[in-house]
Amino acid sequence: MSNTKTAGKTIVVEQIGSPIRRPGTQRETLIGLGLNKMHRRRELEDTPSIRGAIAKVSHLVRIVDEA
């Protein structure tokens, strides 16, 4: 049932920090989110797994828009 509540919701994330001199897992998380260059934006589905990935690299990304 919880899937019907989040169906269609998206979140726009922008990379604001560089992965240089960061642990490899943080770089991999950025790539998994579709971000690997500064100021790139991606529109992603708003799911708990995406929110967890964003929380993991919260110091490198910012949420631009929640729809």
Image: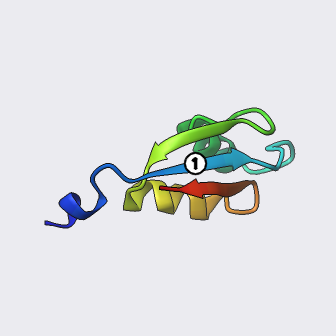
Q: Nearer the viewer, residue 61 or 28?
A: 61
Q: Answer few, some or many: residues within 10 Å of disc 1's Cα (few below 14, many 20 plus, some between 14 and 19).
A: some
Which sits in the foreground, 31 or 5?
A: 5
Query: Percent x, y for residue 10?
Result: 44, 50
- Count of numbered badges drawn on the protein: 1
At a point 68% along the width and 42% down the height, the residue shown is 27
Q: Which residue is mark 1?
A: 12
Residue located 69% across and 46% down the image: 14
Q: Is residue 54 left or right of residue 47?
A: right
28 sits to left or right of 10: right
Residue 16 x, y percent position in the rendering? 80, 49
Colour scheme employed for the rendering of this structure: rainbow
Q: Quadrant of the N terminus?
A: bottom left
Is 61 left, or right, of 43 in this rendering? right
* Vertical position of residue 2 compared to residue 28: above or below: below
Q: Looking at the image, which residue sits at the far left? A: 1
**Which residue sits at x=59%, y=46%?**
29
Residue 14 lies, with reference to residue 63, above or below; the image says above
Q: Position of residue 26 (x, y in %)?
A: 67, 50
Give percent across and percent down for residue 47.
Answer: 38, 57
Q: Residue at x 70, y 57 (%)?
A: 62
Q: Amino acid at mark 1?
A: Val
Depth check: give the residue in front, 6 or 31: 6
